[in-house]
Image: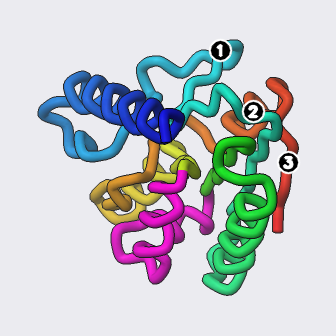
Amino acid sequence: MFKKTARLLATAAFGAAIALSNAGSARAANPSMLKDFNFDHPIFIHPAPFGKKHLVVQVSQGDPKRWNLALNSVQNILDYFGEERVQIVVVAFGPGLGMLLAKSPDAERIASMNAEGIEFDACHNTMMGIERATGHMPVLLPSAVIVPAGAVRIMQLEAHGFTYLKP
C-alpha cells in the first residue's frame, strides 16, 4: 500500500511538473521528456525503486493484433512478478504509435495498465512525421509519455539494464 501511494504521489508530481513546463502547448496534457531527456540518466513516470526486474517492450507495427499480443505479454509478466517487483516500459514508434493514439481500440486497457504502473512512451519523431503528413500533431492517450525518439529510449533503457522484448 505504501509503495502504491508513493508511486501515485511521484507520478502526480512528475505529471504536474511536466504540465507546468508545457503550459500553453498543444501537448500539455501528456507528460513529456523532450526538455529533460538525458541518455545517461533515465527518468520514469512510474518510478519502481523496489523493482528487481526491468523490461522494455517495443511496439513498432501498426497491427492491432500485435498490440494485443504486446499488451497480453506485458500483463502476463506483471501478473507473474507483481507490480512491486517489475518495472515495465512500453515504447511505441512508427506504425506502432497507433496503439497510443486517442482513438486507439486499446485505450481503456492502456489506462488500466498505466494505473498498475506500466509506462507507455510515444515517439516524438513519429509524431513529427504525422504532423508533416497531416498538418497536425496526433492526439495521444492521456497516459502516453512523449519521448524524443522511440528507438533511442529503447537503447537508453537497455543500456541501463532493461531486458528487451518485441512480441
Is residue 109 on the magenta stretch? yes
**Residue 44 in sight:** yes
Q: Position of residue 122 (x, y in %)?
A: 52, 50
Q: How many other residues sit within 10 Å of disc 1, few (<14), some (14-19) or many (≥20)?
A: few
Which dot marks residue 41?
Answer: 1
Could you give the CA–CA distance between mark 2 and mark 3, rounded to whole angstroms? 9 Å
Which dot marks residue 119?
Answer: none
Q: Amino acid at mark 1?
A: His
Magenta stretch: give its range: 93-116
Q: Secondary structure at mark 1?
A: loop
Q: How many other residues sit within 10 Å of disc 2, few (<14), some (14-19) or many (≥20)?
A: many
Residue 94 picture quarter: bottom right
Position of 55 with respect to 119 (left or right) is right
Q: Residue at x 44, y 51 (%)?
A: 144
Q: How many other residues sit within 10 Å of disc 3, few (<14), some (14-19) or many (≥20)?
A: some
Q: Residue at x 41, y 66 (%)?
A: 101
Q: Nearer the viewer, residue 116 or 103?
A: 116
Which dot marks residue 164?
Answer: 3
Q: Amino acid at mark 3?
A: Tyr
Q: Position of residue 35 (x, y in %)?
A: 42, 20
In the image, residue 40 sits, relative to residue 148, either above or below, namely above
Q: Residue at x 71, y 58 (%)?
A: 78
